[in-house]
Amino acid sequence: MGSFGNSCGAAQAPNLTGFEWLMHGFGFRDSQYPDGITGVRQIHSGIVATAAEVRNGFVREADALVTDEHGVTVGIRTADCVPVLIADPVTRSVAAIHAGWRGSAKNIAANAVSELVTRYGARAEDLHAAIGPAIGGCCYEVGPEVARRFGAWIPEYGRAESPVKIDLGRVNRMQLEAAGVRDVWNSGECTNCNPERYFSFRREREKAGRMTAFIGRRS
C-alpha cells in the first residue's frame, strides 16, 4: 500500500520514480497521455507480446507487452482490471500488464516476468513492480467457481462454496513474489470506490471509459 506521486496527469508509483531513464504512469479519468504508446487488443488472456511484434503486425491480441527499446512506451487499458507495470534497472526492460480475473487465473504477471528473464536476460530479483488502481476486495464479488481458480495462491478462495469478494491486487502481488520479484508496490486504491478519480466497469457498465497504464525507456 502507498500513496501516489503525480506527474503529467498520471499517477506514479514511488518504487519506480527514482529511475531517470524511465517514464511511467497510471491514468485517472481525465489524464492526458504521452504520444505514441504501443498498445494491443486485450482479450483477457495470459499472452505476453513484444512491442516490436505488435508494431510489425505479428501480434494483434495479448494482455501484456514488453520491450527494452529506447523511446518505446507500452501501455494497457483498464476500468477495474489490475494494471501492473514492471521495470528492470539493469537491462532497462519494461512490462505493462492487464490482469483481469481471467488473466490473473492464468498467472499473466508471472508470464511477463518470465518473458523479461528469457528475452532480455533480466533477473526476477532485480525487477521492480507496481500494481495500480483496480477494483478492490471491498467491491469485487465473484461466484465460487471463479474464486476457486485462485486457491493456489489464497487457500480460502479455493474452498469457496458461495459468492466471495476477492482482491485481485493481492493475488497479483503474490504471483509476482512467487515469480521471484522482491519489490512489489500496490496502490491499494479501488476503482469502484473512487468515481471522481477512476472509471469502473462494474459501476458504469458500458458507459465506462478506460484508464491507461504506461511504461517505457526515455529516448
Image: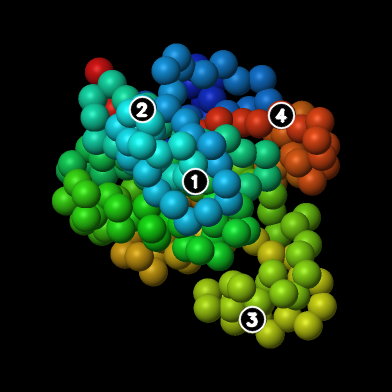
Residue at position x 40%, y 39% in the image: 59
Describe the element under mark 2 as helix, strand or loop.
Answer: helix
Say the numbered circle drawn on residue 209: 4
Say the numbered circle drawn on residue 55: 2
Image coordinates of residue 66 in percent, x first then y, are 34, 41
Classify mark 1: residues with Cα within 10 Å, few (<14), some (14-19) or many (20+): many
Quarter of the figure with residue 214 = top left
Please state if 112 lies on the left or on the right of 33 as rendered: left
Image coordinates of residue 9 in percent, x first then y, are 55, 19
Residue at position x 45%, y 14% in the image: 35
Q: Quadrant of the C terminus?
A: top left
Please state if 17 lies on the left or on the right of 29 as rendered: left
Describe the element under mark 4 as helix, strand or loop.
Answer: loop
Which residue in the structure is indicated by mark 1? 63
Question: Quick one: label 1 or label 3, which is nearer the N terminus?
Answer: 1
Mark 3 and mark 4: Cα distance apart in space: 32 Å
Mark 1 and mark 4: Cα distance apart in space: 18 Å
Which residue in the structure is indicated by mark 3? 158
Classify mark 2: residues with Cα within 10 Å, few (<14), some (14-19) or many (20+): few
Question: Quick one: label 3 or label 4, which is nearer the N terminus?
Answer: 3
**213, 183: nearer the viewer:** 213
Classify mark 3: residues with Cα within 10 Å, few (<14), some (14-19) or many (20+): some
Three-letter residue code for mark 3? Gly
Please state if 84 lies on the left or on the right of 169 as rendered: left
Q: Residue pushed farthest front?
A: 58
In this rendering, which labeled residue sits more in front, label 1 or label 3? Answer: 1
Three-letter residue code for mark 4? Gly
